[in-house]
Image (spheres, grey):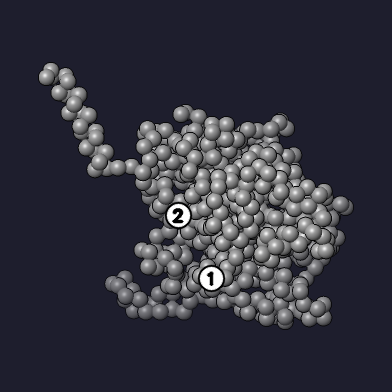
Amino acid sequence: MGKKLKTRLFITALIIFSGLIFPFQSYSEPGKIKNIIILIGDGMGFQQLGLLNSYAKYAPDSIYKDRKRITAVEQVMQAGVIGCVYHEAANVLVTDSAASGTQIASGKWAGSEMIGIDEHGSPAETILEKAKKMGKAAGLVSDTRVTHATPAAFAAHQPRRTKENEIAQDILNNEVDIILGGGLGYWIPEQANDKESEIYKILTQKTLGQVYIKSKRKDNLNLIDEAVQKGYVPVFTREQMNKACGDKILGLFSYSGMPDGIVQTLNNDNPERSFPNLREMTIKAIEILEKNDNGFFLMVEAGQVDWACHNNDTGTLLHELLQFDTTLDYIFQWVKNRNDTLLIVTADHETGGFGFSYSRMNIPQPQDFPGNNFPGEKFAPSFNFGTHNILDRIYNQKLSYFGIMREFDSLPKPEQTAKMMADIVNKYTDFPIKEDEAAQILEIERNKYYIQGHDVLGAEIFPKINDFKEFYVYGREIRTGILGRVAGKYQNTVWSTGTHTNAPVPLVVYGPEEISSRFSKMLHTTELGKLAADAFIRQ
């Protein structure tokens, strides 16, 4: 046998032997990306991750205390690469989710509130659409509405994000294989609003009475029926979702947004729970999508991080971050032993200008302190820097600020008093407020920025907020921002706005090093979008 032939046989045997000892779950060539998963924490800046990290590390009763106090975010950061994303939309300083989502999805600049349309007004092909052209499967998962700005940006093309009826049609026509989230109202005919109608009865039966039946459409298109004709299996409850088979699933589990993070936490172990959580929807999506031999694209949105921040609601924010983190935990466990999948974890913008801060209220009393540098002296900080037990008290919140306002508004008018507001807040949170503080939440004033016919600013009366009022835009929902200020002094938390900021947001990427290393820098959302699509195209 010749020397060259012996060498070749030896190398071949070595490769086979190595493969037996170190098997991979996937056998794609190194650097060839078969699957891409993007997990977006809507409105999740570095400071929101700071809340999650502080809770995990320092809360005395943290749910992470038996997990070495390490979040899934930290695990992925340790294993992957870290970057930073700025996200301004075309020609403006601050983005909304529609423009930012479009920029991530397409790699092209977009105008404010545009869905899947570039800054010149033309449709912008998205990474999801490119994946479908390559024969891959595609999925969208959100705990808001599947027609909401972020998921819509990956599969629809509309001039305004408010066109959710049209967005639903676009998503369906794009034949996104897995669609899971809220927003049933945009998929059912207007006739369903008649409780005596046949369609109302059919939908009530199909949803097992677990989803509020009300249409947001102005026509009688039944997109559920159209989906069935296209081969989708429609599901409306957690059990239906778990049992669903086939390659295409349309899951609509609520009339609008899905139950918030606090509701999910309180019902996590409830065997009667009819609605899935973000992790469960993601598990189902991957279970179906991975059947495609060509691979898949999946976008998962923890969208209610943003909603909690718009409401300046720290307790709900923490629970939304926990939903985000447990979802990431599953994704990372699925991805980490593969060499064919790129995981991108990021946000579309920051919401609320959130942070912990020190204050002049409740200055700690001087105390004895060990060590050689405190002989005869007391440890006496000049300000209140916040104690770790605050984190457990934030976690203990039992109803969102939005839910608190809804409960208050459901009372007869004579009972809508400051005392009753304080009672409701104190019932559901660990930070009691006083009656005079509750009265601040109920103060109103004329809307200085009234615009007749405007969706939001068309209200002549607004809640009265005394600072940065121009940046609290959502009418009666401003009351949650006032509550956030009242509670903030007890929580050592601060909020600067009821809308978005242009603060850069986190980027964490895990996958083959030759691909993931390209993301380890400061990127604009358009650059992020191009790099993500390029990971597919380079095949």
**Which quadrant does the N terminus fall into?**
top left
Residue for point 73% across, 74% down: 408
Q: Are marks 2 and 1 in contact (CB under 8 Å)?
A: no
**For this rendering, which residue is in front, 459 or 357?**
459
Image x and y of residue 274, in percent:
60, 65
Between marks 2 and 1 in the image, the one whose residue lies nearer the viewer: 1
Q: Quadrant of residue 144?
A: bottom right
Residue for point 17% across, 28% down: 10
Q: Is residue 59 visible?
A: yes
Residue for point 51% across, 61% down: 322
Image label count: 2
* Label 2 secondary element: helix
Q: Is residue 83 visible?
A: no
Tell me: residue 280, above or below residue 532: below
* Label 1 secondary element: loop
User: Which label was assigned to residue 271?
Assistant: 1
Image x and y of residue 78, in percent:
38, 50
The residue indicated by pointer 2 is: 330
Tell me: residue 254, above or below residue 4: below
**For this rendering, which residue is in front, 152 or 283?**
283
Tell me: residue 214, above or below residue 131: below
Residue neighbourhood size for the residue with mark 2, other residues' Cα within 10 Å, grouped as few (<14), some (14–19), many (≥20): some
Query: Which residue type does callout 2 highlight?
Result: Tyr
Image x and y of residue 529, in percent:
55, 37
Query: Which residue type does callout 1 highlight?
Result: Pro
Residue for point 47% across, 65% down: 55
Q: CA distance from mark 2 to mark 1?
A: 21 Å
